[in-house]
Image (cartoon, rainbow, N blue to C red):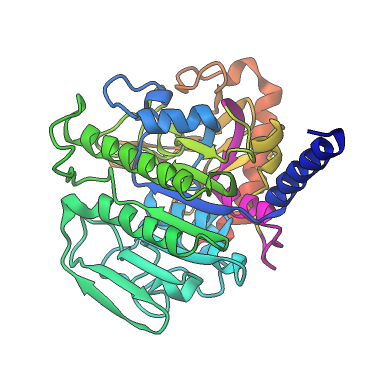
């Protein structure tokens, strides 16, 4: 081959690479329900086998200090959808129940709406952001397609719904052991139908939230019993997803994110972290697995200790898609430099809420906790004159209070708490003590 032909070929390859880099990426977000920090092999699990997720982490970026924006479901999902601390959306108080009439306001801009009109969009799985008009169905919030449940699968009455603009919302009875596979089946069909254009697919699973309904192909296989069975099924389905992306030649045009809406409930592992789902200011309720995979776009085999939160997903995806932020307050930050260059966190601090109260502040090294639970009491720690400071880099279990050793840090963290409370607690929809 002549030198000119070689150079032309190399130039063409470079142009192709540049064109691919300029193409807005497809985005698939797999949001597990109550998946614990320690439930994946790559996160230290010894009882649950997750080879596909472990491989995804080896081929992508795993963030070790990634937080959900709440320690329970509805507010965390509101934060993910909008890029805003949930208290700004009016959904920070508890979770939506079947008899409730509230939901995500139509004034909130979801990730799907922010990607319009360039992206095809689908939400497949659990919504739990309002099941009465005008908050329902999700097709009113920017999603072209919805297939899933209005709220958690342990709530009643319950039906599996399917809806798209111009199509009557239909429903059917729920076959619980088939749910996870059906969600992935429908998601894969959406990918194939939209392979020629950018798409956003949110796979918002019901597993491993209790009750546990393993698929027959997985039932009785895991060393962690039924809980492990459903996590291993999620792992298998994620393997199907990435295999299909490769088969369609979309792997280098797609970003896949896997995370959880909060920490584990009555089963599952929070790993080395203190407490669990709903556990006031402690990390076990908030810190969750986070894996971002994007061959040719994101770093590979990278473990990042930078602090981040699910409110960062919206600004990160919009930056990658070349789309502007919504014309509203966005609390999340663009993680693209972290995921592509190994940069430092764009956050100086993260605020953790328990319902509508500030519960803790996390900086890179320090965690200052001001709310906990004891028996039936929601305890503002200030009432017992307690200053609770942890070096979470050295002590992720939040076991040893170092406040007496670091008075200057305590003073700084108390000032941060004061600012956070002054900014956010006046937005509360309900009045509560403390």
Q: Nearer the viewer, residue 342 or 297?
A: 297
Q: Is residue 278 visible?
A: no
Residue 367 placement (x, y as % from top left): 57, 30
Q: Residue at x 31, y 38 (%)?
A: 236
Q: What residue appears at the point 45 percent right and 36 percent down from the top-left corner? A: 288
Q: In front: 65, or 334?
A: 334
Residue positioned most to the front: 1
Residue 278 placement, left or right of 232: right
Q: Of 358 and 411, which appears nearest the observer?
A: 358
Residue at the extreme right: 4
Q: Position of residue 70 (x, y in %)?
A: 46, 47
Image quadrant where one finds the N terminus: top right
Whether the magenta-drawn stretch holds residue 308 is answered as yes
Q: Looking at the image, how many numbered discs can be counted on the residues?
A: 0
Whether residue 265 is visible to the viewer of this picture, yes or no, is yes
Residue range corresponding to the magenta coloring:
301-329
38 falls in the magenta region: no
Q: Position of residue 366 (x, y in %)?
A: 61, 27
Image quadrant where residue 185 sits: bottom left
The front one of 122 and 206 is 122
Q: Is residue 394 above or below residue 185?
A: above
For image coordinates 51% across by 39% down, the residue present is 67
Residue 79 in percent (x, y) is at 52, 55
What residue lies at 55% left-to-right and 46% top-to-bottom?
Answer: 255
In this rendering, position of residue 15 left or right of residue 212: right
């Amino acid at each position: 081959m002549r030198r000119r032909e070689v150079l032309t070929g190399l130039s063409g390859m470079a142009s192709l690479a540049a064109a691919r880099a300029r193409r807005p990426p497809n985005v698939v977000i797999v949001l597990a329900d109550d998946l614990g920090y320690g439930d994946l092999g790559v996160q230290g699990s010894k009882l649950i086998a997750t080879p596909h997720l472990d491989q995804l982490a080896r081929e992508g970026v795993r963030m070790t200090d990634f937080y959900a924006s709440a320690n329970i479901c509805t507010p965390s999902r509101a934060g993910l959808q909008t890029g805003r601390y949930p208290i700004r959306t009016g959904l920070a108080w508890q979770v939506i129940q079947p008899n409730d009439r509230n939901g995500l306001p139509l004034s909130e801009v979801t990730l799907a709406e922010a990607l319009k009109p360039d992206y095809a969009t689908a939400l497949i799985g659990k919504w739990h952001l309002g099941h009465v008009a005008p908050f329902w169905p999700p097709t009113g919030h920017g999603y072209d397609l919805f297939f899933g449940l209005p709220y958690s699968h342990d709530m009643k009455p319950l039906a599996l719904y399917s809806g798209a603009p111009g199509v009557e919302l239909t429903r059917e009875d729920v076959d619980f052991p088939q749910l996870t596979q059906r969600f992935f089946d429908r998601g894969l069909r959406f990918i194939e139908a939209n392979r020629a254009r950018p798409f956003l697919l949110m796979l918002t699973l019901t597993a491993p939230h209790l009750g546990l309904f393993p698929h027959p192909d997985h039932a009785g296989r895991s060393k962690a019993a039924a809980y492990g069975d459903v996590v291993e099924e999620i792992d298998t389905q994620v393997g199907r997803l990435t295999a299909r992306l490769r088969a369609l030649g979309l792997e280098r045009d797609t970003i896949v994110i896997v995370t959880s809406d909060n920490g584990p409930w009555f089963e599952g592992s929070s790993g080395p972290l203190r407490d669990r789902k709903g556990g006031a200011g402690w990390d076990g309720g908030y810190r969750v697995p986070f894996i971002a995979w994007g061959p040719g776009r994101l770093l590979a085999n990278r473990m990042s200790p930078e602090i981040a939160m699910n409110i960062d997903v919206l600004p990160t995806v919009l930056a990658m898609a070349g789309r502007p932020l919504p014309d509203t307050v966005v609390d999340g930050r663009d993680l693209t430099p972290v995921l592509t260059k190994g940069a430092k966190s764009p956050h100086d601090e993260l605020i953790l809420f328990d319902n509508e109260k500030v519960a803790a502040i996390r900086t890179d090294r320090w965690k200052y906790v001001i709310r906990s639970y004891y028996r039936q009491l929601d305890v503002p720690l200030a009432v017992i004159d307690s200053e609770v400071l942890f070096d979470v880099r050295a002590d992720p279990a939040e076991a040893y209070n170092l406040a007496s050793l670091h008075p200057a840090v305590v003073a700084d963290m108390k000032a941060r708490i004061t600012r956070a409370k002054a900014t956010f607690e006046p937005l509360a929809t309900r009045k509560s003590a403390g």
